[in-house]
Image: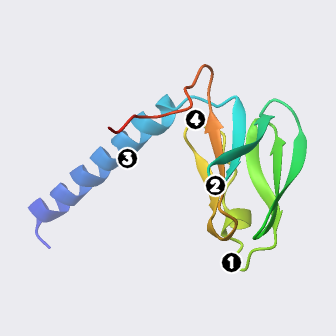
Amino acid sequence: MKKTDLLLVVIALIAAAGIWLFYSAGADHGLTAVVTVDGEVRAELPLDETDSIEIETEWGYNIVHTEDGQAFVTEADCRDQICVDHKKIEKVGETIVCLPHKMVVEIIGEGEAEMDMVVG
């Protein structure tokens, strides 16, 4: 590898780190975790409270927990357990998805609209 190639790699890594820091630092902390199943809102959990809710679906169940300004899934009876292994979420727009149960946990902020866009 030439010196110029190494220099380009270092510059690209620094630029990528800068972009990541810019976007992650600018994200707002959410206020509410909204739980939907197959597009239907099942629960809204304030992130400033400690709470748990069991979400029953025709495909199985999930237990969603909020604590210390974060939301996470503590238990599910799905086979893959991806939703349980997912990191805790706290910033606006972050989601946890359980595909087998068609469940989505999404963090929303203050005054956030129900729809992101209208396609017509």
Q: Amino acid at mark 2?
A: Ile
Q: Are marks 4 and 2 in contact (CB under 8 Å)?
A: no
> Residue 98: x percent and y percent?
66, 63
Q: How many marks?
A: 4
Residue 17: mark in rendering = 3
To which residue does mark 2 refer? 96
**Label 3: which secondary element:** helix
To which residue does mark 4 refer? 92
Frontmost residue, 63 versus 30: 63
| Residue 98 higher or lower than 33, as above or below | below
Left or right of 50: which side holds 114? left
How packed mark 4 is, by other alpha carbons closer than 10 Å (few <14, some 14-19, many 20 or more), is some
| Residue 48 higher or lower than 120, as above or below | above
In primary-sequence order, the first of circles 2 and 1 is 1
In primary-sequence order, the first of circles 1 and 3 is 3
Q: Are marks 1 and 3 in contact (CB under 8 Å)?
A: no
Q: Amino acid at mark 1?
A: Asp
Here the colouring is rainbow
In primary-sequence order, the first of circles 3 and 4 is 3
Residue 80: mark in rendering = 1
In primary-sequence order, the first of circles 3 and 2 is 3
Residue 66: mark in rendering = none
How packed mark 2 is, by other alpha carbons closer than 10 Å (few <14, some 14-19, many 20 or more), is many
Q: Quadrant of residue 97?
A: bottom right
Q: CA distance from mark 3 to mark 4?
A: 21 Å
> Residue 54: x percent and y percent?
87, 55
Q: Amino acid at mark 3?
A: Ala
Q: CA distance from mark 1 to mark 3?
A: 32 Å
